[in-house]
Amino acid sequence: MSEIVPRRVGTPIPRNAKRTGSGIHAETYVEQTAIHALASIGEFAVAEVQYLKQVQRTAENANPDCAEAVAYIVGLTVQGIARSVQHFSSRLD
């Protein structure tokens, strides 16, 4: 049987229950950190894509002859961003 650990308030709890609670707390913290990281990366990616689309519209308005080339470059860049986010996500899983 495990030893009893006195608590400041309430009834005493066994040591192994306290260790289990600490382990659960640590696992939950790691999961919350991973979720926050994914959300942050996703938000950053969306902001970058929006910025690229804005630059694309500006470049197309400034020089309509280059519209196809600019659209191609922006499309490739957006695909690269999507791949990077997916790669980051798979590494966290």
Image (cartoon, rainbow, N blue to C red):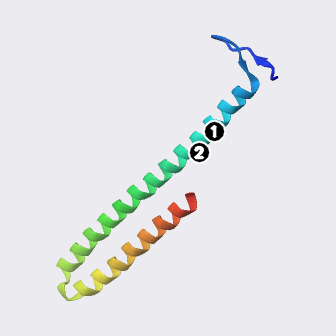
Q: CA distance from mark 1 to mark 2?
A: 6 Å
State the image quarter where residue 54 is shown: bottom left
Residue bearing mark 1: 26
Percent from the top left, x then y, of residue 30? 59, 45
- The vertical placement of 60 against 14, above or below, is below
Mark 2 neighbour class, 10 Å CA radius: few under 14, some 14 to 19, many 20 or more: few
In this rendered view, identify the residue nearer to me: 55 or 29: 29
Most extreme residue toward the bottom is: 65
Q: Is residue 22 left or right of residue 3?
A: left
Q: Quadrant of residue 14?
A: top right
Q: Which mark is residue 30?
A: 2
Residue under the point 67% across and 36% down: 23
Residue sitting at 80 percent across and 23 percent down? 2
Determine the secondary structure under disc 2: helix
Q: Left or right of 11: which side holds 45? A: left
Looking at the rendered structure, the secondary structure element under dot 1 is helix
The residue located at (47%, 54%) in the rendering is 38
Quarter of the picture containing the N terminus is top right
- State whether residue 86 is above or below residue 8: below
Q: Amino acid at mark 1?
A: Ala
Task: Using residue 26 as the reference point, say whether residue 44 is left or right of it.
Answer: left
Q: Are marks 1 and 2 in contact (CB under 8 Å)?
A: yes
Q: Position of residue 41 (x, y in %)?
A: 45, 57
Q: Is residue 67 above or below residue 9?
A: below
Position in image of residue 42 (x %, y %)? 41, 58
Q: Is residue 10 above or below residue 76?
A: above
The image shows residue 51 at horizontal and vertical percentages of 31, 65
